Amino acid sequence: MIRSTSCIRQVITPLYVSKPRFISTKAARINVTRPFEEEGLPWYRADQFYPVHIGETFISRYKVVGKLGYGAYSTQSVRLCLRQILYEHVASLGSQHPGQAYIRGLLGTFEISGPTGKHLCLVQTPMHMTIAELQCQNPSKRLNKELLNWTLFNLLNALSFLHDEANVVHTGKFPKTASEVISTHGGRMANSVLYVQDINPSNIMLTIDDESLLPVFEQTEASDLSPRKVIDDTRTIYGSRNLGLPKDSLWGQPVLFDFGEARIGPGPHRGLIQPELYRGSEVLFEMGWDSSADIWNVAVMIWDLFQGYHLFHALDEDQEISATHHIAEMMAYIGTPPTLEYLRRSQVTSHVFDEKGQWKNAGGVRIPSQGVMSLERAETVLEGEEKKRFLNFVRSMLKWVPEERRRAGELLRDPWLEGAIPY
């Protein structure tokens, strides 16, 4: 975490970096042969990280007081530049849309020079834990209705702004030369992809309303130094430190962040996106995608948060991800694709549907029966009319045809979200 020592300007001109005035010998040292923190990332390369030191000051303005964590993609300069472009695009709109308040914004940028080149830095306000981490705090490992709907109210407002005013799709993929495969194996569809991004509980964070947490974090780091791995005279890897819990349960607002894979423009965009279990039908069938892919994401994420488990499993008999099994589960939950016109949008559909739109049982994969798999059976938290309203809400997002999914602004007016604002 970096503390500002003066006012923040919109864009900061690079000046210089000052090194910390002392190096402590009291911190626990990590064995140099043991992977530590970001070194555990499969694509980690030390030369892509700036060697930050706690106590260091950037451009006479920002002092490093501790390490809150590290991002799986923070080594990727292309992704960081894409994120900056998105933030600048959003800021240029001058919008008054209320959803803009539920997006983690950009306060400024600056550039620093390191041993292996220049590094772009984005200035943003510190955040607390993610919704995924908050979910794990609950013994039931799920959110209650009030917290779920509060999260959805903020998220849908954010998406309404992104989709309707900024013309941005949050979901996207990292343009890496990793394998992207959609092929047939034994008559079945299979797929794999690396470096994907989507709307999920780990991409929604809580703001810090209890600001007393910040000086406590700084003081704790000063008195109880984080463990660290000293690589050489220039590079040290520090252990991450969590913020404490807010007083009187003063949790902040859920906000959407991480726009490194966002796409500007109406689409259709191309490419395999989203983690396997979050993929919509248009992604599996290579039909192209637009902002409605975010809406499918929201529906699947709701199941993770509220039910405490994934809606889709998409596994074959060998416990391998299978797009054919995924589509079969979709049919069990939301019925068959509505028209032949929809299936004709892509040749990929011919792997699993015949020319009449009938399921081919490709590779022996059958559609689970309603007695085994249905949204009614899968939903185990609610009863009666409340359960009916919830399932109607989810079904309005889980549509084969992307254009038939309700937009974020429409979802905000759904009966399920009545009374969702807890403040």
Image (tube, rainbow, N blue to C red):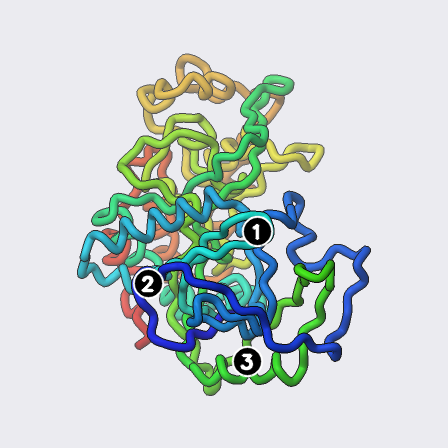
> How far apart are the two marked residues, 1 and 3, measured between alpha carbons?
24 Å
* Mark nearer the N terminus (1 vs 3): 1
Q: Nearer the viewer, mark 2 or mark 1?
A: 1
Position of the C terminus by quadrant: bottom left
Residue at mark 1: 72
Residue 152 picture location, percent across and down: 36, 60
Q: Is residue 172 left or right of residue 68?
A: left
* Mark nearer the N terminus (2 vs 1): 1
The dot on residue 364 is: none
Residue 280 sits in which quadrant? top left
Residue 112 picture location, percent across and down: 48, 57
Is 151 in front, or is 343? 151
> How far apart are the two marked residues, 2 and 1, measured between alpha carbons?
23 Å
Q: Nearer the viewer, mark 3 or mark 2?
A: 3
Disc 3 residue type?
A: Glu
Disc 1 residue type?
A: Ala
> How far apart are the two marked residues, 3 and 2, measured between alpha carbons?
26 Å
* Mark nearer the N terminus (3 vs 2): 2
Residue 71 sits in which quadrant? bottom right
Residue 250 visible in this rendered orientation of the protein: yes
Residue at mark 2: 102
Disc 2 residue type?
A: Tyr
Residue at mark 3: 218
